[in-house]
Amino acid sequence: MIKFFLMVNKQGQTRLSKYYEHADINKRTLLETEVIKSCLSRSNEQCSFIEYKDFKLIYRQYAALFIVVGVNDTENEMAIYEFIHNFVEVLDEYFSRVSELDIMFNLDKVHIILDEMVLNGCIVETNRARILAPLLILDKMSES
Amino acid sequence: MVVPSLKLQDLIEEIRGAKTQAQEREVIQKECAHIRASFRDGDPVHRHRQLAKLLYVHMLGYPAHFGQMECLKLIASSRFTDKRVGYLGAMLLLDERHDAHLLITNSIKNDLSQGIQPVQGLALCTLSTMGSAEMCRDLAPEVEKLLLQPSPYVRKKAILTAVHMIRKVPELSSVFLPPCAQLLHERHHGILLGTITLITELCERSPAALRHFRKVVPQLVHILRTLVTMGYSTEHSISGVSDPFLQVQILRLLRILGRNHEESSETMNDLLAQVATNTDTSRNAGNAVLFETVLTIMDIRSAAGLRVLAVNILGRFLLNSDRNIRYVALTSLLRLVQSDHSAVQRHRPTVVECLRETDASLSRALELSLALVNSSNVRAMMQELQAFLESCPPDLRADCASGILLAAERFAPTKRWHIDTILHVLTTAGTHVRDDAVANLTQLIGGAQELHAYSVRRLYNALAEDISQQPLVQVAAWCIGEYGDLLLAGNCEEIEPLQVDEEEVLALLEKVLQSHMSLPATRGYALTALMKLSTRLCGDNNRIRQVVSIYGSCLDVELQQRAVEYDTLFRKYDHMRAAILEKMPLVERDGPQADEEAKESKEAAQLSEAAPVPTEPQASQLLDLLDLLDGASGDVQHPPHLDPSPGGALVHLLDLPCVPPPPAPIPDLKVFEREGVQLNLSFIRPPENPALLLITITATNFSEGDVTHFICQAAVPKSLQLQLQAPSGNTVPARGGLPITQLFRILNPNKAPLRLKLRLTYDHFHQSVQEIFEVNNLPVESWQ
C-alpha cells in the first residue's frame, strides 16, 4: 500500500504532497525534510530504494524535481519505480513536456490526475488515455 | 475598501517572489487574513478560489484548519468546480479525529446516488481516503450498488472504495465478497486491478475468504496467461510488457492463495514457469514482473525445478548493471538462504563481487556473504571478508568484525588459522569488535598450548607497531604476561626468530601503561602483565618494582589498588610471589549458544557410557579443555564469568572457589531396539538447578542399511515443560556409523513423576517406520 506520494525539489520545497494515511501537519514537514535529505545525499551510483523507519522509499529524479513514494513492506519496489515513470509520462502528455512550473501553477489538475491513478494507496488505472479522459472533458466544459 | 481577491496563480507568484522565509510567512499571513475574512462574509462566488489558495498554503506547511467548514459548504453546492475543490479540501484537511467529517456523509450520499459520473468519482475518491468507520457503515449500501453499474469509470473507483471500507470495518467483508466472482469476468483492466486488490484484502483478513477464493485460481491463471501471450497491445503495454501492474497484482494474489496449499500451487506451476521464461528482461517493467514471479515461487509449494529456476533468475539479477535490480536480488537471496542454501551457494562468487561495490546496498551483501560461509569455503570467504573489512565504511565495520569472528569460531579449520584471523581482525578494526572478543581470544590462546610461543611472538610484534587498538593491546599484554618466558626464549620455528630483549619488553609494557590512549582496563592488564613478568624473567626486578610503586599513588582507584597489592607482594610476601603468579589454569567460560550445546553434550558424553562423537570442531576444542582441567571442575556447573583481569586482586586469588563433589551419575537407559536400530537415553541433573533434567537421546544403527529422515518427537505430562533442541542430524549410517544425538530439556519444578512418550519416524531398508511408545523404567533419580 502506498503511504505517501511527494514531489519535492532540490531546495526542499514541496511541490505536491499526498498522504494516504493520516499524519500530523508538523510530522509531515519533518518527514518531507528528512526524506529529501536522504534522497539528496545519495549519489548516482546508489540504488533508488531506501529504507526509512518502517517505510520503503522509492525515488526518481527528473531534472530538479524528486518524486518520492513511500510504501509499506508488501509492495514490489520495482513496480512502483515503473509507476512513477508512468505518472510522469501522463503529466508529460497532458502538459506537453511538463516542467516544474507547470506543476506549481496547475496543482489542482495534478491532484486530479494523481487521484485518477491512485485511490487510497492502491494503483487503480495506468492507461494514459483513460486517466486523461475525464480531465479533458472537464477542460472542454470550462472553456465553453 | 473591497480588495479583489487574488487568484491562485497570483498567490503562487507572490510566494515565489518572497526572498526569505520571513517574507514568505508575511505574504501568507496576509493572505490567510483575507481568506478568513472572506469566509466570514460568506461569499459564495469566490469561495472555491479562497479554498484553493488555502490548500496551497496548507501544502507548504501552514495551519489551515479554519477552512474545514468551508469544504462542507462547497461540497454541498451544485457547481462542479465548487464540489471539486470542496472534495479535495475534505481529503486534505478533514480526518477522522475532527467531528466535522461526519457532516459530509449526507452530501456524499446524495452525490453518490445522483448518477452524475464525475461527481460520483469525486465522492468515492474522498470517501476512500478519509472515510471513518461510521461513514463507511452508512455508505456501504450505496457503494455496493455502484459496484454493479455499467460505467467502468465509476466501478473501478467503487471497488477501491470497498477496499478502504473493509480496512475500516472488517464486518463489511461479507457485503463485498459476493460481487467479486462476477467482477473477475470483466475485461476492463481498471476493474480487474481493483477487483484483485479487493480479493487480496479479503483474503488477508479472513482465512474463510481465503478458502473461498481458492476456487478462482484457475481463472486468475487464465487471465495472466492471456496477458502474457497477448503480444503487443497499445492499450496497456509499458516497454513491451502488457500491463505489468496488473500482472504484478495477480502474481501477488496467487502467492497468497497458493501459500501452504498444494493443489493451488500445482495449478500455478506451469504458468509461473511460462511467465518466468517469456518475460522480456531488457527493461525495468519486465524485471518488476520477474521479481514478483520469483517471490511467488519462493512462497508457494512449488516444484523443486521451479525453485532452482527462481534462484537462477536472482543470480542473473545480481549480474545486471542496474543497481536497483541488484538490491532487490540481494534482499531476496537473503530471505532464501535459510531454506535453499545449496542453490544460493552456487551464486557465492557473484555475491562476493557485490562486496566490492561502493553502494549502500552493501550491508545486504555483507549479511548474505556471512550467511554463505560454511566449512568448505571458509578460507576463501574469510580472505574476501577481511579484505572488505579494511575498506568498508565505518558503520558496517562493527557488523563485519563480529560476523567474521563468529564465522571463524564456527568453521575454523585449524587453531592457528583461527588465531591468525582474530589477530588480523583486531589489528584492522580493533575498536569495533565486541567486548567479549578479548575474552574469547585469551581463552582460545590459553587452550592452544602448542601455539603459545607463536601467538605471543605475533602479538608482541603487533603491539610493538601499534598500541592504540585497545582489544589488541589487552590481549597482547595478557599473553606477554603469561608467556613472557617463551617470548624471550626466541625459539619459535613458525616465524623468523627474533631476539627480544627483556628491557624491550618491559619498555613496551611501560609505554602502554603511560599512553593516554590506553583505557583503565588496558592499564590494568599491562600492570598485571608486568607483575607476572617479574617471575618469568631472569633479570632483577628493580625496574618492575619501581613502576609498581609509582602506580601505588595513581588516581585511578583500580590501578592504585593493584599497584599497592603488588608492592606488598614484593615487600612482605616475596616467598609466595612465584606460586601466586604461576601460569593461569584454563577457566571455563560462558561461550556463545553453539558452545553451550556442545558443552552440554560433552558433559553428557563424560557421564554416559556410549559417548557420541561430537561432530563440530568446537566440541573437540572443548574436549581438549576437558583434558587440561582437573576432574573436579569437569562438572556441569555453570562456569564463573571469565574475570577480565586475570590475577586481579590478591584477595580473590587466595579465595579459591569450593567445588562441590559431582552427583552420582544416573544410569543410562536403552528404550528402543528394532532391526539393529537402537535408542538410548542418558540423564543429567545439574546440581545448581534441581528442577532441570537434561536427557540426551542417542540413536545408533548396527544394521546393514542406513537410517534416513530420522525424526524423534517427545511428549511429557502437562505439569512438566519440555524443550527439544535441534538434533545433530537425521541420518545414521549403517554398521555402527555416526549416531544422532538430540538434547531434551525438561523442567520439573514440582517434582512430578516423570513420564515420557516418544514418537520415532525414519526410513530404514526402503520402508518408512513409525514407532510410538512410552518409556518405562525411568530411573527415580531423574525426577525426585
Image: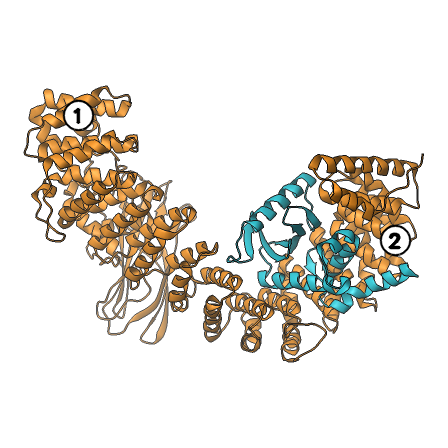
Tell which chain the image draws in orange: B
Height in image: B724 above or below B781?
Answer: below
Q: Quick one: quadrant of the N terminus of chain A?
A: bottom right
Tell which chain the image draws in cyan: A
Q: Which residue is mark 1?
A: B547
Q: Quick one: quadrant of the C terminus of chain A?
A: bottom right
Does label 2 or label 1 sit earlier along the sequence? 2
* SS for callout 1: helix
The amino acid type, in three-letter code, at marker 1 is Val
Height in image: B491 above or below B202?
Answer: above
Crowding at mark 2 (Cα within 10 Å: few <14, some 14-19, many 20+): some
Out of B61 and B738, give the one closest to the viewer. B61
The amino acid type, in three-letter code, at marker 2 is Thr
Chain at tag 2: B
Chain at tag 1: B
Tag shown at residue B81: 2
Residue B277 position within the rendered picture, expressed as x and y whole percent measured from the top left: 54, 77
Height in image: B770 above or below B393?
Answer: below
Residue B63 position within the rendered picture, expressed as x and y whole percent measured from the top left: 75, 38
**Is B442 left, or right, of A93 in this rendering?**
left
